[in-house]
Image: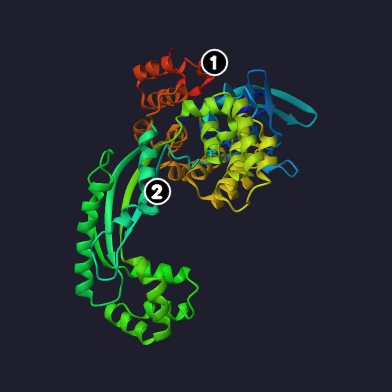
């Protein structure tokens, strides 16, 4: 919004006088001089206030023999700030100031002030005097702009640092199994196998699961195989028969126990098990066998090539192939781990039971900051946990203990993107915006993206900030602010989904800029739950002309 003000001679950046006019007369003729200030409402950007004032002098106004000194001053609550005066001279003055012609002239000057707290309620005025020889006439001051808009300072600038997640398993999945071994070319289950250690251990594991209220058998399986010697068709049939005989044996050995009906599968030739057992064996030339497996995929070719190595094949027949004539009895088990409440109790009464993941989880659960800190320190002490070190630094940042956080981060992997981002937050807190920006761009995480938006707002790059923050996750505050600062009010309104007093304040600003008085009132009433926002609103030029 532009406005043109008629300026008394004292308030012009260059006060003019006609050749025949005295300095006294220049003041009386001031209404013929016009002034324009851009912006008409001063705005603070990156801690400074910049504006341009243009003054148009009519023909026969500026006395050719005078010097005019003009001082721009921002008057605010608690004080004032003055720039170094501008000086102008008439056409007959022999000095080095800017010359203003008596034929009429437009003069423009750029103004620059450092922001001082209190300037959000202020105005810009020009104070001047006309100097003619030894004579000096003070000119009346003239207000030329209101100020100053500090909306960008509403940015949430503490920075985002997310804690590293734990890998604590609330439910632990495991399997327990036993095996039934078969004789070559046979699918008959021998009674000795059902009484053997493998099946006994399997049944004992099932009994242990049944006795443990935290454990549950979720499913069972029977998987049958044949060793990869002989024809493929024969082995497929043999594997199928073994799956059926093992299924019958299952009913026999699990009688009286609560289990699910098993899923029955026949694999056929067990080349995967063959490769594993050969790799674990001490058979001579085992590398040659493994190379054959990698070279050929056809089962018949594989078997033929291996049989050609007669000495090796003899060793396979004794050590490997008998282990592959089998059926696996499998139970899939889920174990319910400690609940959050149980973890807290163990933390207080039996911390020795907690491993690294459990300590990281319980640290995220407890609310007391001191208890969080001591838990992270315990994880560092017992497990040398870098995640705990990082989370401790993040905790310090949340508490405003920036120096302690910085010290902790120095011990961590400097290439870790989370660490890089956290170091950027430290730089942000210290107002080293250049280093903070470099670190956030290097980190590239979601947190770093949001934090980069903060730096861009604080340094006046609002368009880039809006682009960076448009997809930012988490709190919507800074995204809404970036849209306001780029005058994208519809996007700002649609992004303001957080129920927070500071966001309601931003919504009130949106309504004020759209001329929606009811929206201003409604949103400010919600925002005033934060008393500091009530005090700000009373001085905020965004709400000039509104009553609340």
Mark 2, Cα crowd under 10 Å, few <14 / some 14-19 / many 20+, is some
Q: For the point 44% across and 23% down, which residue is it?
A: 500
Residue placed most toward the observer, 369 or 256: 256
Q: CA distance from mark 2 to mark 1?
A: 74 Å
Q: Which residue is mark 2?
A: 201
| Residue 266, horizontal then vertical, whole percent | 23, 61
Residue placed under numbered mark 1 in the picture: 535
Crowd band around label 1 with a 10 angstrom C-alpha radius: few (<14), some (14–19), many (20+): few
As drawn, the label of residue 174 is none
Q: Is residue 512 left or right of residue 404?
A: left
Q: At which x and y percent is residue 189?
A: 26, 59
Query: Do we see residue 273 in this rendering?
Result: yes
Q: Position of residue 508 (x, y in %)?
A: 41, 22
Quadrant assignment for the C terminus: top left
Discs 2, 1 touching: Cβ within 8 Å: no
Does 101 appear above or below 330? above
Q: In the structure shown, which secondary structural element does the residue marked by tag 1 occupy?
A: helix
């Amino acid at each position: 919004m532009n406005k043109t003000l008629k300026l008394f001679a004292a308030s012009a950046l260059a006060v003019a006088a006609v050749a025949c006019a005295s300095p006294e007369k220049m003041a009386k003729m001031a209404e013929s001089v016009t002034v324009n200030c851009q912006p008409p409402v001063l705005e603070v950007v990156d801690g400074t206030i910049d504006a341009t004032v243009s003054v148009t002098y009519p023909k026969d106004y500026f006395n050719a023999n005078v010097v005019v000194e003009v001082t721009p001053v921002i008057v605010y609550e608690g004080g004032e700030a003055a720039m170094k005066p501008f000086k102008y001279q008439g056409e007959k003055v022999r000095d080095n100031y800017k010359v203003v012609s008596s034929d009429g002239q437009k003069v423009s000057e750029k103004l620059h002030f450092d922001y001082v707290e209190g300037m959000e309620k202020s105005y810009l005025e020009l104070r001047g005097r006309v100097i003619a020889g030894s004579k000096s006439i003070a000119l009346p001051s003239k207000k030329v702009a209101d100020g100053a808009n500090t909306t960008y300072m509403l940015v949430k600038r503490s920075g985002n640092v997310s804690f590293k997640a734990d890998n604590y398993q609330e439910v632990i999945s495991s399997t327990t199994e036993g095996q039934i071994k078969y004789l070559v070319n046979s699918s008959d289950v021998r009674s000795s196998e059902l009484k053997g250690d493998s099946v006994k251990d399997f049944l004992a594991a099932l009994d242990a699961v049944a006795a443990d209220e935290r454990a549950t058998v979720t499913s069972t399986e029977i998987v049958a195989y044949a060793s990869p010697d002989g024809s493929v068709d024969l082995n497929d049939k043999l594997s199928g028969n073994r799956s059926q005989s093992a299924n019958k044996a299952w009913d026999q050995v699990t009688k009286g126990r609560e289990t699910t009906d098993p899923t029955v599968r026949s694999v056929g030739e067990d080349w995967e098990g063959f490769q594993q057992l050969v790799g674990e064996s001490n058979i001579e030339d085992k590398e040659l066998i493994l190379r054959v497996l990698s070279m050929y995929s056809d089962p018949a070719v594989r078997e033929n090539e291996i049989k050609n190595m007669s000495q090796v094949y003899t060793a396979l027949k004794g050590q490997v192939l008998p282990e592959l004539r089998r059926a696996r009895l499998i139970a899939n088990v889920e174990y319910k781990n400690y609940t959050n409440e149980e973890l807290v109790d163990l933390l207080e009464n039996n911390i020795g039971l907690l491993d690294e993941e459990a300590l990281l989880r319980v640290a995220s659960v407890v609310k007391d900051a001191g208890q969080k800190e001591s838990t992270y320190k315990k994880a560092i002490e017992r497990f040398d946990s870098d995640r705990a070190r990082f989370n401790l630094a993040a905790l310090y940042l949340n508490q405003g203990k920036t120096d302690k956080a910085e010290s902790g981060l120095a011990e961590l992997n400097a290439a870790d993107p989370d660490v890089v981002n956290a170091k950027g937050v430290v730089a942000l807190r210290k107002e080293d915006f250049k280093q903070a920006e470099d670190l956030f761009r290097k980190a590239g995480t979601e947190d770093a993206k949001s934090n980069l938006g903060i730096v861009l707002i604080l340094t006046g790059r609002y368009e880039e900030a809006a682009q960076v923050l448009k997809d930012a996750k988490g709190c919507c505050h800074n995204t809404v602010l970036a849209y306001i600062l780029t005058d994208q009010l519809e996007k700002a309104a649609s992004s303001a989904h957080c129920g927070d007093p500071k966001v309601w304040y931003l919504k009130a600003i949106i309504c004020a800029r759209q001329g929606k008085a009811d929206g201003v009132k409604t949103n400010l009433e919600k925002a005033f739950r934060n008393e500091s926002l009530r005090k700000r609103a009373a001085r905020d030029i965004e709400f000039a002309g509104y009553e609340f």
